[in-house]
Image (spheres, coloured by chain):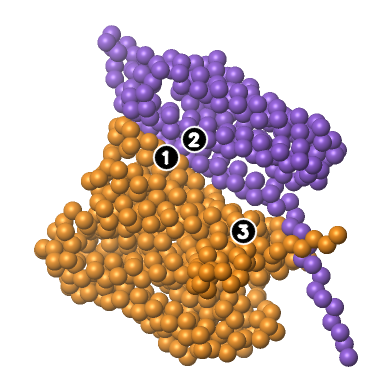
Amino acid sequence: MTIALPAAPTPAPRRQILVATAMASASAFMLIMGMIAMWLKFRAGAPTRNSSDGLLIIKDWMPASISMPEVAANIMLITFPVGALMAQWAAYSAKRDDAQHRSLALAICFVMGLAIVNAQIAVYSQMKIGLADGMFQTMFYAITGTMLLLVIGGMAFSLVAFFRSVGGRDNDTDVVNAHALYWYFLTAAFAVVWFVVYVQK
Amino acid sequence: MTIIDTHVGASTHAQGTGSAFVVSVGQWITSSDHKKIGRLFIGTSLLSAVLAAVLGLLFGLERMSPAHMQIFNGNATPQLFSLYQFALVFGVLAPLFVGIALAVVPVQIGSRAVAFPRVAQFGFWAWLFGALMVDISIIGNGGPGGGRANLVDLYLLGLALAGIGLLAASLSIATSVLTSRGPGITLDEVPAFTWSALVGSIATLLSVPVMIGTIIYVYVDHSHAQLIFGGNKGINTFLGWSLSQPMTFVFVVMALGVLAEIAPISSRVEQPLRPIVLGGIALVTAAALGAVTQTAHVLNWAGTNSDKVKSIVLYALFNGLPFLGALIVVLLSLLCLKMGTPRVTASFALALLGALMILVGVAGNLLYTIKSTSLDGTVFSEGVVLYLVYGGLLSALAALTHWAPQLWGRTLEEAKVLGLALIGLLATVLAGFPLYVAGFSKQPANTVVGFDYSGPVALWNLLTGAGHALIALTIVGFVGLLINAVRKGTPVSQEATA
């Protein structure tokens, strides 16, 4: 009589969270790029008129009364790579089983996220524009608000990874690596938003 | 120490508490079993297909006498057309194949569960509630062009939520294929359907977010300013592309995967030129790149040589490549028949007929996007969508027939499903072809009155209505066969389903 051995257990999935985060990041990048494309289309199509002296052609896109708070925007641009650096530090520490540095790096990453949210709120308050004031204003709030939501998502990711880290999940490298990847995506996405929305306007 | 872990799909409800029905409903609602989530997607999509077909039948009957309205109220028709288009694309085509992939892919790759089953579960409920929000808003005069501003906002939110649901489910499918394959199954060795699920899911993940980005702009503008996107009247101008070609091509990729899967099995031969078949399936997803540009790439043989080259390159990339991909899959599946010893199974007949209908739809789009044909704004585009959706529906029925032993532990009656396949073919041709002809006669799209042309107006629209009625009959018949098999059929042995 032949007795069949039970089937071997299914192997654990390989880098599942990292792969899913990569695809979710690609998806979110397409979201931001789609919005940037619409921004560029409307900016290019904004009506033009001659200045009162007839020497200049003025494009009616961003009203002259609005001043873009470039300091706060530039601070955001600098803060994103710092956040990504912290996320990479967490990944490096996780690889070396250094729980203290991993937790510290994740906590700093969360604080960087808070700093970005703070800077974005500063931008809104300094610009003093209403959502329904005009074409530029409406689109500005829509695109920067979406970016802000993605940053809040990154902060939530940092918080979850942090609590897992302090909870003793020492073999959590997949989550920490995925977290770093998400922060790299945030940095790249904001770099585009910064250049198109805050610099080129 | 002994650790007892429950399987992700295992019941978490205490047995014997409450009625069996309530417990069963609770288990279905909260289940993270991939087969249950897949079946929820499939069931609701088929229900949506029947509703879309009924709406199509009513449109056909109404358009028989375009001088005056008999069924609809004048103000309701633009919203009802929006409901019809949404139901066809986001209510039937996309979720139906997502459901089949969720149910079948883990089985094909030797995984016990789909990756992130709770995300897949969230995907279903988000899609369902999004679709219901769209339906409710349109019924309450809130779709594109609708008069109630709050319900127009609800429509936009519903559309975004349905898209997020599809994204969540697609993420789960793609991650499963990439990370949860059994030992020894490399990516180039996965079954053709799993391959199509992977590339189709990735194409969805890259194209649907662009639609959501546009919805964010339109929603913010509509609810606060109404300065940029034309308020309720402008919604279709900016979002119409998401319910049209080439976006719909992204959702039919898995239908071609069904044919590529079943053809070699029915022919009892190894798929010849398999890498080319997989490449053909992937080529169709080139449509995703065209969709994210939010433009129909029209072949316009006018202007300078540079304009002509630019026009022909974009036309070939975004309209030609999907056609080429679909053609490759169909031709190489037919090659299986020639090289093997084929037997006509119901699932193969449905898959082949479905893929052929999809090919007619993609070819129709090639014609539609040639500017000199002057088909823009005619019902020809509706014909293309119907060929794609109803062709996809036939392919989905093929998949359900083929994998019924794995999904329900039963086989369906071959002769009866073959009969339904023939009715389904007739239905698709009747629903789509008269609109192709009427398109050349310049029958305008998205309207039921106020047009006239030399030709049998009533006949074309009657035939289209009859096609919709027959497709509803096909679906109801298929579901009846399935329920009968589950209730009275003999269970298939474990060996047979393995």
The residue at which mark 3 appears reads as B117
Query: Which of the two residues, B11 or B143, is positioned nearer the viewer here?
Result: B11
Q: Position of residue A149 (x, y in %)?
A: 52, 35
The residue at which mark 2 appears reads as A146
Q: Are marks 3 and 2 in contact (CB under 8 Å)?
A: no
Chain assignment, label 3: B
Q: Which corner quadrant holds the C terminus of chain A?
A: top left
Chain A display color: purple
**Circle 2 SS class:** helix
Q: Is residue A142 above or below residue A170?
A: above
Q: What residue type is labelled 2?
A: Thr
**Circle 1 SS class:** helix
Question: Callout 2: 10 Å neighbours few (<14), some, many (20+)?
Answer: some
Residue drawn at (43%, 29%), measured in percent from left and top? A141
The nearer-to-camera label among 3 and 2 is: 3
Query: Which of the two residues, A152 or B377, is positioned nearer the viewer here?
Result: A152
Q: Which of marks 1 and 3 is nearer the N terminus?
A: 3
Question: Callout 3: 10 Å neighbours few (<14), some, many (20+)?
Answer: many
Q: What residue type is labelled 1?
A: Ile
Query: Which of the two residues, B381 or B475, is positioned nearer the viewer here?
Result: B475
Q: Are marks 1 and 3 in contact (CB under 8 Å)?
A: no
The residue at which mark 1 appears reads as B216
**Residue A86, quarter of the rendered image:** top right
Q: What residue type is labelled 3?
A: Pro
On the same chain: label 1 and label 3? yes
**Circle 3 SS class:** helix
On the same chain: label 3 and label 2? no
Q: Position of residue B43 (x, y in %)?
A: 46, 70
